[in-house]
Image: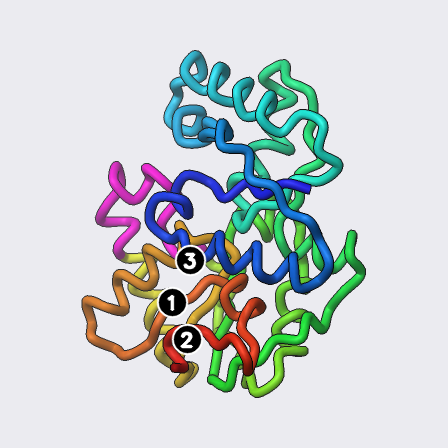
Amino acid sequence: MALFPTCLTDTFYPDTARAVVRLLERLGCTVDFPLDAICCGQMHFNTGYRDHAVPMAAALARAFDGYDAVVAPSGSCVGMVREIHPKLGLGSLPVYELTEFLVDVLGVIDVGAYFPHRVTYHPTCHSLRMLGVGDRPVRLLECVRGLELIELDEAESCCGFGGTFAVKNADTSTAMLTDKMWNVLGTGAEFVTAGDNSCLMHIGGGLTRLRSGVRAVHLAEILASTEEDPWPATR
């Protein structure tokens, strides 16, 4: 199988990609990382630059050709590859969002994780509406030893990121983010988690500017944490 870390994770949150590898190797997988894997073209496609998106999507397909499974810690990028690439004339890759792969392919819910903190979960729009990951992330979190999972009010509401939407419609995006942060703070959680670093960057950035003390952490980093190899914040 292969890791598709996504551009945003590879550039800004490499610890998430490392966590995915540690987690999957702990569960017995052999993980490859093709160095010629590039952007899936989502940002370009979503902003109307289809002609730019197609060659990027084709290059990604070539990089992962031949793998029996491609795993990504991002519902939005998986949605792009699975749902949009075929509409661009490309074949379909066996691509999975991380929680899909853990629950549906490996058949695992308890991954042996340990994270002794209060956590609330934000289901991202693409994972929720495009991929339909459902309760897979919640089921995985419920099996993490030491973790107290706190339900998030209006959890299915968008955080306001939406890629370039946050730039082109900053006022609307900020208003949506404010509602999301208010609900996160209302949980009393120490951490907010999600399956997409794009949403966590948006939510976490807002919470940091408020000096709220609530930290954003990708779901993969929680699932990769154990008593022997804790998340850095617990050290």
Q: How many marks?
A: 3
Label 1 or label 3, whichever comes before in sequence order: 3
Label 3 or label 2, whichever comes before in sequence order: 3
Question: Which disc is residue 187 wearing?
Answer: none
Label 2 or label 1, whichever comes before in sequence order: 2
What residue type is disc 1 on? Ala
| Between 222 and 197, the one nearer to me in the picture | 222
Circles 2 and 1: CB distance less than 8 Å? yes
Question: Which disc is residue 216 wearing?
Answer: 1
Instruction: Say which quarter of the image contains residue 33.
Output: top right
Taking the spot 40% from the left edge, 31% from the top edge, the residue there is 43
What residue type is disc 3 on? Asp
Please state the extent of the stretch shown in magenta in the rendering: 158-174
From this view, report whether residue 133 is shown above or below residue 150.
above
Which of labels 1 and 3 is toward the front? 3
Question: Which disc is residue 15 wearing?
Answer: 3
- Magenta span includes 142: no
Taking the spot 80% from the left edge, 61% from the top edge, the residue there is 107
